Image (cartoon, rainbow, N blue to C red):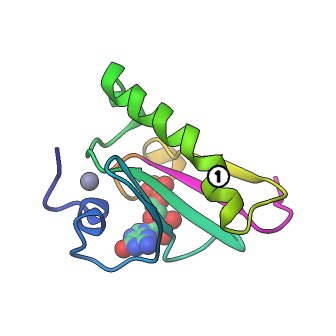
Amino acid sequence: MTDKNCVFCKIAAGEIPAKKVYEDEKMLVFRDIEPKAAVHLLAVAKDHFKLLSEMDGERAELVKYMLCKIPEIAEQNGCKNGYRLVINQGEDAGQTVFHLHIHILGGEILPW
Ligand code: 5GP
Ligand code: ZN
């Protein structure tokens, strides 16, 4: 499923440019336009769903697939010494794009 008004669906469809670092049939990883760390990547599933709270078995498989791919992608993109994964869920967390995504932050020692 895609959402024609969703910025990450548009990036996945090539309608909005992004600095892609990895792509396969299920997922895409690209650089955040406003990086919050020396390396700030966003991993998104190509299938559109909004929130962690919309998880079901099929979507959980997709997130599992992304989590299995992320270590190699992070290490190949400047995060050899470690990185932090973040999923913002909802308003209080400051979620601004409602297409589930995993932030990959690293490339420096991260303050907690
Ligand atoms: P959220 O706050 O929803 O967890 O994170 C959304 C992230 O998407 C933000 O860090 C924001 O900078 C990034 N972002 C929003 N629009 C675009 C865009 O058009 N291109 C890219 N590369 N990143 C975007
Ligand atoms: Zn989307």
Q: Is residue 16 magenta?
A: no
Q: Secondary structure at mark 1?
A: helix
Q: Quadrant of the N terminus?
A: top left
Residue 97 position, x and y percent, is 37, 57
The residue at the point 21 percent across, 75 percent down is: 15
Q: Which residue is mark 1?
A: 72
Q: Is residue 103 magenta?
A: yes
Residue 6 position, x and y percent, is 23, 60
Q: Is residue 63 above or below residue 85?
A: above
Q: Is residue 24 above or below residue 51?
A: below
107 and 24: which one is in front?
24
The magenta segment is 101-112
Q: Quadrant of residue 111?
A: bottom right
Q: Is residue 5 left or right of residue 112?
A: left
Q: Is residue 11 left or right of residue 37?
A: left
Residue 30 position, x and y percent, is 47, 67
89 and 71: which one is in front?
71
Q: Quadrant of residue 53?
A: top left
Assess disc 1: are there few (<14), some (14-19) or many (≥20) residues with their C-alpha within 10 Å of its C-alpha: few
Q: Is residue 17 above or below residue 58?
A: below
The residue at the point 25 percent across, 72 percent down is: 14
